[in-house]
Amino acid sequence: MISDLVIILPDGSERHLAPKSTGADLAADIGGRAAREALIAVADGIQIDLNTALPNNSQVSLIFPNSDEGIEVLRHSTAHVLAQAVLSLYPGATFSIGPPIQDGFYYDFDLPGDQTFNDDDLATIESKMREIVGRKQPFIRSEVDRAAANELFANHPYKLEILDGEADDPMSGPEGGVITTYRNTDDFVDLCRGPHVPDTGYLGHFKLMRVAGAYWRGDEKRQMLQRIYGTAWSSKKELKQHLERLEEAAKRDHRKLATELDLLSFPTELGGGLAVWHPKGAAIRKIMEDYSRQRHEEGGYEFVYTPHLANERLFQTSGHLDFYADGMYPAMEMDNGTYYPKPMNCPMHCLIFGHGQRSYKELPLRLFELGTVYRYERSGTLHGLMRIRGFTQDDSHLYVASEQLLDEITSLLDFVLSVLRAFGFEDFTFNLSTKDPEKYVGDDAIWDKSTEALREALDRHGLEYAIKDADAAFYGPKIDIDVKDAIGRSWQLSTIQCDFNLPERFDLTYVGQDGERHRPIMLHRALFGSIERFFGVLLEHYNGAFPTWLSPTQVQVLGVRADHDDYAASVVTQLKANGVRSEVIEADDPLGARIRKGKLEKIPYILVVGDDDVANSTAGVNPRGGSVERDITIDSFIERITTEINNKVTAPVT
RNA sequence: GCCCGAGUAGCUCAGUGGUAGAGCGGCUCUCUCGUAAAGAGCAGGUCGUGGGUUCAAUUCCCACCUUGGGCUCCA
């Protein structure tokens, strides 16, 4: 074969192809899976369609559905098919953007005459998409000039805005001055950078998930478009697994579990975003809070209490009324002034620091409060315990001299991680947010120094972290800590934030060794963040099966027959004497029924006692998630469970 | 706040233009049982709230409240 096109494969080998060969030709030449499954090619780092000619002497790799790049192409191409289906089913509809996203894709549409999609429409649209997939329509790329593009998209104003560069679309818009389009049929052409799969037949493992409103260009002052979300995968199996993961997540939804386990509720009469804690939920919360208090006490924190209301002057001083008035509950006009419910605890803590004269000898001063705050979250943003209008922060404010900053943050990181680990979280992600040059207060030197201190503290612990450039609040850089839960979801929980603003606003000073007044740096540190939200995360993490040390009821003792109830009660007395939360379930129902009920309540240990146990001071132990053990002496069980509780074991000991 | 859904017994849900039903749960009685559902009976609902249409509304329409999924926002 006479070759004059040479390409280099990822393994370094060369391949000689006919002139003007494409990625598809290369795939065919390689044969096998490459010929059947390659989606696109990457030539010298640039993604190209399989039917695009390969540059000579380029490094080429083929992309398959099982790679991140490949699945993204699949999702992106599926989004195109969605647009094609909608445009053909809804005459007069226009479309804006349709990128691949985590697990899938979406496309935004504007339907004529304020039409909207409903769930039934999704089924219709999905079958239309399957029809398009069945036709194996090729994605044909063209480069067009602006005049041609204007003509092609004359009826699609959102596309014209993208062409004008007014709207950003990562998937289309002119790149390097070249406008590209992809045409599937005479009727459907989209503005797009590509690349795409060779034809629609490569697609198919997708499902339309839901409709949603979405503002054009993400701007709530603009047109609300109709968004359709879908999920797409490279195989039927992966699609199925994804849908199962969603089911699993739905099963452990904290709102559902909270109702099933009778932990808390959101009574309508209370108003949106406000919860009441029932005894069992409150018991868990109290254990969490007690443990938090204990750790803070050991950690050198001083406890403070502050009221829920404050005169408006406080929030003028703190600046909250300037910056966050929209998120605060409205003013209460009183005869001696205007009052607001507090949205944060920090202004009050600043009052405590500012009371009297502080010496450098008192620093770092660590103030801690389980402080309940109220924020007016917009109705559409409320979400169970995760986004709520009244919540309690495990809030501490640390006032440090700038030379103490590094050591303080270093030990703070230890403290935070140690407490999070006690609750069973092991997998952390750290984000360091740096100054937004557009929006900050304080001088550059202190920003630099503090940012370095945060970075250095992370380095000292050998922790990996991502830098989020320009993501800090206006008042100082911060470290955010995310945890991964049992089913791999990430939750942002703790935060360590420097604040150069409040010490200034409250004119906080301490007298240094030199006799001069100095400005302390303030650190905001939330560990759980919000107790409510942390509780919700824990509930989902453990799927309601809290570790024994957190369980509201740790042991239920069941007599086999009613005449064993007295012995069961004596076992409970012994357990309680050892601080084990336990109760007798009297033999009104058959044993199996009582066990089942206890299992559904996710009780860590169910003890069954019958004739043999009464005779021998033993019990049958039925641990959550384990198998039944008979003839365990009460003493050894107490030893075992108290050890488990004291060690805060996060999985039941079996 | 905006878009699309939902709201019927404590919970999960069925149902209808002629003022309601199941399962689980609760209570009572019977059963006394060795590791995930014994049996019977009873109680329990202004069908989210307020308007409207209609001879008649839980059902149709409107508004509001609460709630789910998104968008926006999140100190």
Image (cartoon, rainbow, N blue to C red):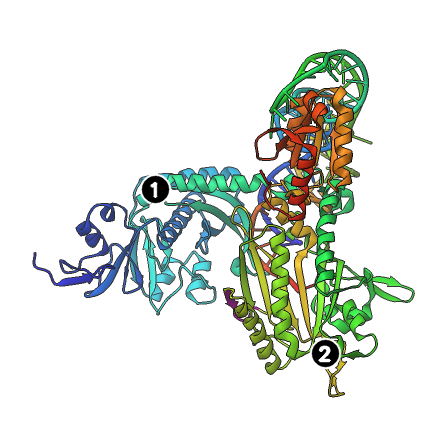
Mark 1 neighbour density, 10 Å: few (under 14) some (14–19) many (20 or more): some
In the image, taking residue A502 as reference, residue A57 lies left or right, namely: left
| Disc 2 residue type (three-letter) | Glu
Mark 1 or mark 2: name the one nearer the start of the chain.
1
Q: Is residue A321 visible?
A: yes
Q: Which residue is mark 1?
A: A133
Q: Which residue is mark 2?
A: A504
- Which chain does the residue under circle 2 lie in? A
Segment colored magenta: A465-471
A226 in magenta: no
Q: Is residue A272 visible?
A: no
| Disc 1 residue type (three-letter) | Val
Q: Position of residue A56 (x, y in %)?
A: 19, 65
Q: Which mark is residue A106?
A: none
**Outermost residue toward the right?**
A335
**Outermost residue toward the left?**
A2
- Which chain does the residue under circle 1 lie in? A
